[in-house]
Amino acid sequence: MAGGIRVINGGTVTSAKGFEAGATFAGLKTYAEDKLDLGILLSREPATAAGVFTTNRLKSPSVVLTEEHIADGKAQAVVVDSGIANACVGEQGYKDAKAMTAKAAKHLGLKPEDVLVCSTGIIGVELPMSLINAGIDHIKVTDDGGHLLARAILTTDPKPKEIAVAFDLNGATVTLGGITKGAGMIHPNMATMLCFITTDAEIQADLLKGMLKEAADESFNMMTIDGDTSTNDTVLVLANGAAGAGPISEGSEGADLFRKALGQVCVYLAKEIARDGEGASKLIEVTVEGAKTLQQARSAARTIAGSSLVKTAVHGNDPNWGRVVAALGRSDAEVVEEKIALYIASVCIMEDGRPIAFHKDSIIAIMSGPEVAFRINLNLGDGRATAWGCNLSEEYVTFNSAYTT
């Protein structure tokens, strides 16, 4: 028997049974009293593992090595640094990534090939391995260390992003927990983000990999902040079976629940990334329905959410809906103007391809809130998708004009 999915109050990546985490300040970032920049996630038992990675042709060696280590569908730990991306530094980057996994493995009593490695931060700078090696020695992993790890992976993020959910299966409680980081260089497919998801479910590697790909396509690949993608993007999920709920197989009730729970975790974290965009003050949600296909709905939603003109209109609370339909028209979605309906929040702005009179001050008031929703019905099919973005502000330009200075 199975039960519904519920959110765990204060949940994080160590909420699932058998997972521990810890973090320290190693000196990769500028010092502050509460700052952390190096962390470890550990499953006490060997875990099934799956990942999705950057589509950028210039991959960090940390990503390359993690792809190699996860190829067998198994892993037991992740070591992560924040502040330096370990990208575009030549052969030394791969050597340093291997050294990080070897050092973390020795610290945890594992084999290096069972440790995954992630890096995030400035591109073109070599990892300070003496600081990292010393830092790893100071990391103590604990059952409640997920909150520390959620802070340690941040770069320009204003706050940690973490969640955990649970459901009942075969008389046991199955838990999924996740943390993520990302606030800039964010755009499908896969953005400047790291995401670590854990679960105490027992699930086969190929099934887990397929579910993760589906969840990422509906969440992390549907968010955009600034139109740029990174060299380091990584989403990892580890499943150790510690819940004791029995194996989850395709087509079972447990598989359906797990798929929904994983999707819920990924969508929540993706929305938090978009909400936390550099300089952002508003979350943009774009839902496109009635498209010919799912792929066309996703293209249209992503294009609108990523439009600089839409993003600046949202920033200024300007109901200039022509920018929305113009972005729609340059997407890959088939459109028939006479069939389009457009809503800002629940207010119809356009129907059957024609503008509808609306009270401008009311729409301005609606757009002044922290979340702005657009809904577009193409009335051509059953395809439906949602994308998330954020407003484009003066602060974003100011911040990124002096990122390394």
Image (cartoon, rainbow, N blue to C red):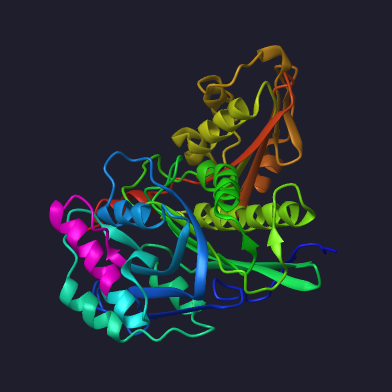
- The residue range painted magenta reads 81-102
Q: How many marks?
A: 0
Q: Which residue sits at x=36%, y=42%?
A: 228
User: How far from the left and from the top, in percent, is residue 11?
Assistant: 62, 74
In the displayed structure image, the side of residue 191 where residue 265 appears, left or right: right
Work out whether residue 287 can be spotted: no
In magenta stretch: residue 77: no
- Note whether 327 is above or below 247 in the view shown: above
90 is within the stretch colored magenta: yes
Q: Position of residue 161 (x, y in %)?
A: 52, 66
In the image, 185 versus 212, the foreground residue is: 212
Q: Could you tell me which residue is drawn at 18 percent across and 61 percent down?
A: 95
Q: Name the foreground residue: 252 vs 386.
A: 252
Horizontal arrangement in the rendering, residue 18 relative to residue 182 (left or right) = right
Camera-side residue of 110 and 259:
110
Kindly give the residue lying farthest to the right in the view shown: 1
Classify residue 170 by image quadrant: bottom right
Residue at (56, 42) in percent of width and height:
217
Quadrant of image for the N terminus = bottom right
Image location (x, y in percent) of residue 159: 47, 68
Name the spot of residue 191 as percent of width and height, x first: 42, 47
Please give the name of the residue rendered at 63% of the width and 76% of the height, measured from the top-left corner. 10
Q: Looking at the rendering, in which quadrant would you find the C terminus?
A: bottom left
Residue 123 appears anywhere in the view:
yes
Q: Nearer the viewer, residue 328 or 173?
A: 173
Side (left or right) of 344 relative to 205: right
Position of 174 compared to 67: left or right?
right
